[in-house]
Image (cartoon, rainbow, N blue to C red):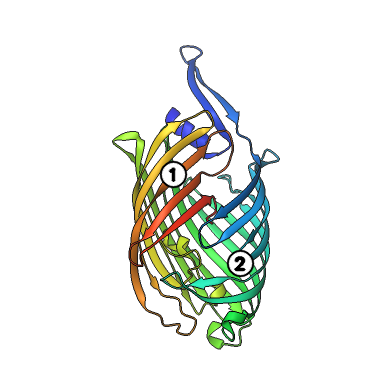
């Protein structure tokens, strides 16, 4: 199946200008000729983003095909209005021959993280010196499933911000074991790589907290996504739903809006329980030598608990609103699509700009 072969090559993420043609050699023999051009895989990426409520600037150096073996390394750092962070990771993907994949990461930061409520008001800010290190092993199960097992260690040395005296969360050290199972199946139609996916994961931790209720935290998450063309290859429908439930979790383990697949919440909003999703359309506007531009629009809904450092039993609420923007797909560089979007939180009546390059700012 030549279509399936092209999908497999596209999924490698390091080739473009793929040409596949069958050739009849004799009455009983045939061969398939494949011609590709390799994308640029060593990529330095400086960036600067202003979202109206925060500033972020820095740079990342990455290689998505290190040593020609599809290994990946990332090294970077950034300065934000709330602090500075450095990080590094190296990973090797699993293959279907039973050879597991492995991923190592490290990060360190000196920051003053902010926490906002539903109204996008900062209700907590504290000083945090953080160090994190981890390793994840992954194993392919057939063509479409992957099992993962990870171990990580996080240390948070917290202290008060002068504007929020006495509200700093306790300093804490957290060791975590995680288990995950994911499914992914993709199809390339010459315009879009559309993917159906699902995943579940569970985290089990141990801490040195003085609060006995926080000594054995647990977290559970899920995600389900679907993409497929409709009417024409240039138009596709997409939807994604996900959620996170944390039990006995320290504030440093709270999750943001991406855990619920939305962008309508404040960039500084975090919660221990949230579930949400989006449903929308994406249209390929024009293809160029360097890649493609698309526009997208979706509607988002999330159910979560308001954040209040003085009342951990805050109100639960449905929030919703539209989101739209443009995506830039790069054909000659092995880099995720760049997205620029604008969201409106209809429940709380505020707008928010967002930018994403494989990571969300």
**Residue at the extreme left of the image, as rendered:** 231
* Percent x, y of residue 94: 59, 49
**Residue at the extreme right of the image, as rendered:** 67
Name the residue that disc number 1 marks: 326
**Residue shown at 63% from the left, 82% from the top:** 208
**Residue shown at 61% from the left, 59% from the top:** 136
Residue placed most toward the observer, 116 or 128 = 116
* Percent x, y of residue 93: 60, 48
* 351 with respect to 57 (left or right): left
* 316 with respect to 267 (left or right): left
Q: Quadrant of residue 198?
A: bottom left
Name the residue that disc number 2 marks: 82
Work out whether mark 1 precedes mark 2 in sequence or the reverse, and give the earlier one. 2
**Residue shown at 51% from the left, 52% from the top:** 355
Q: Quadrant of residue 119?
A: bottom left
Residue placed most toward the observer, 164 or 282 = 164
Quarter of the figure that contains the N terminus: top left
**Residue shown at 43% from the left, 42% from the top:** 186
């Amino acid at each position: 199946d030549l279509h399936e072969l092209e999908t497999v090559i596209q999924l490698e993420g390091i080739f473009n200008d793929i040409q596949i043609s069958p050739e009849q050699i004799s009455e009983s023999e045939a061969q398939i000729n494949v011609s590709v051009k390799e994308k640029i895989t060593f990529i330095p990426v400086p960036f600067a983003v202003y979202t109206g409520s925060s500033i972020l600037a820095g740079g990342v150096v990455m290689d998505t095909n290190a040593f020609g073996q599809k290994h990946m390394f990332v090294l970077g750092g950034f300065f934000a209005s709330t602090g500075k962070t450095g990080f590094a990771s190296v990973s090797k993907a699993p293959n279907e021959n039973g050879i597991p994949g492995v991923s190592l990461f490290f990060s360190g930061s000196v920051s003053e993280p902010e926490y906002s409520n539903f109204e996008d008001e900062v209700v907590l800010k504290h000083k945090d010196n953080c160090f994190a290190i981890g390793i994840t092993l992954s194993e392919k199960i057939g063509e479409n499933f992957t099992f993962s097992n990870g171990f990580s260690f996080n240390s948070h040395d917290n202290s008060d911000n002068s504007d929020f005296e006495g509200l700093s969360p306790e300093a804490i050290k957290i060791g975590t074991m995680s288990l995950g199972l994911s499914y992914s199946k993709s199809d390339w139609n010459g315009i879009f790589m559309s993917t159906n996916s699902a995943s579940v994961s569970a985290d089990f931790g141990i801490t040195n907290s003085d609060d006995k209720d926080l000594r054995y935290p647990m977290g559970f998450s899920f995600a389900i996504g679907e993409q497929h063309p409709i009417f024409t290859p240039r138009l596709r429908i997409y939807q994604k739903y996900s959620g996170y439930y944390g039990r006995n979790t320290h504030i440093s383990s709270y999750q943001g809006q991406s855990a619920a697949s939305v962008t309508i919440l404040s960039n500084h909003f975090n919660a221990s329980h949230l579930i949400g999703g989006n449903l929308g359309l994406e249209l390929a506007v024009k293809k160029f030598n360097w890649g493609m531009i698309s526009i997208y629009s979706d509607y988002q809904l999330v159910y979560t608990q308001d954040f209040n450092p003085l009342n951990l039993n805050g109100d639960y609420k449905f929030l919703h609103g539209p989101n739209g923007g443009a995506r830039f797909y790069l054909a000659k560089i092995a880099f995720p699509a760049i997205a620029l979007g604008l969201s409106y939180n209809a429940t709380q009546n505020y707008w928010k700009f967002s930018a994403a390059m494989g990571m969300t700012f």
